[in-house]
Amino acid sequence: MKATKQRKLNPIALATICGTTALSGAALAQDVLFDNLDYDGDFLYHIFAYSIQANDSFGQPDFGNGQSFVVNGGDYTLDTLIAPILYDDFVAGVNELTLSVYTNGGDGLPDTLLETATFSGLTSTYGTLETFGFSGTTVLQDGARYWITATVPDDAADAYSFGWFWNADDSIVAPTVTSENNGPWQGGVNDDIYLPQGAFRVEGTLVPAPGVLTGLAALGLLGTRRRRGG
């Protein structure tokens, strides 16, 4: 898979974190923030999938969909999404998918856009987990809910689609959202009906607490002064 375009909105500067890491010589380990890739026998996920499509050859509306998750255990940067999203090569068209990250609004729907990235070259083989890389600069806050939505660019010259597969146990339900013809998101946290959730894993890097940053920075400065004094 090749990332073709990536755009960051509402950038959050991590120069302090990077500088402190360089001073301390410590590497920040990547963590799993969310994982519902549920096993059912030999299967990671279900044979059914949410449709993500544009200009469907059967006359169906254009569809986008989104999955949500809650961050626990601290603040993390958003680094990677791993998900079983399959390109439908039975519908000819551009192989291009856009993933966007939103905060959760008071209405339980995607609200503020934090980051968006467009990818191409996805596989068309069932059973493949795709890895999508983000900028690593969007900070996800502890205890907050976020949405990751999947859409396809609207190109009137092409018809193409993707499928985001549910996790293997379809009794595991969660808030989801859908959109038709680029319209408003429907469903969400405040909806009475929860549907099987698309399978995915979110990975990120723990952001040290301010007190830890201050301590590491002080150690780095102390080491620099000692070297200069020597």
Image (spheres, rainbow, N blue to C red):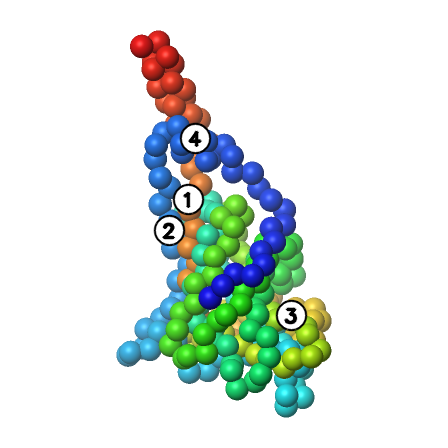
* Mark positioned earlier in the residue sequence (1 or 3): 3
Tell me the residue that label 2 is attached to: 31
Find numbered disc 1 in the image and state the secondary structure of the residue it sits on.
strand
Mark carried by residue 20:
4
Mark carried by residue 206:
1
* Mark positioned earlier in the residue sequence (1 or 4): 4
Q: In percent of the image, x 52 and y 46: which residue is there?
A: 137
Tell me the residue that label 3 is attached to: 153
Q: In percent of the image, x 50 and y 54: which residue is there?
A: 134
Among all residues in the image, which is located at the extreme top?
229
Foreground label between 4 and 3? 3
Q: Is residue 31 above or below residue 48?
A: above
On the rendered structure, is 47 left or right of 105?
left
* Mark positioned earlier in the residue sequence (3 or 2): 2
Report if the CB atoms under discs 4 and 3 are less than 8 Å apart: no
Foreground label between 1 and 3? 3
Provide residue 56's location: percent of width, then percent of height.
63, 84
In three-dimensional space, the C-alpha distance between marks 2 and 1, rounded to whole angstroms, equals 7 Å
In three-dimensional space, the C-alpha distance between marks 3 and 2, rounded to whole angstroms, equals 31 Å
**Local crowd size for mark 4, using a 10 Å CA cut-off: few (<14), some (14–19), many (≥20):** many
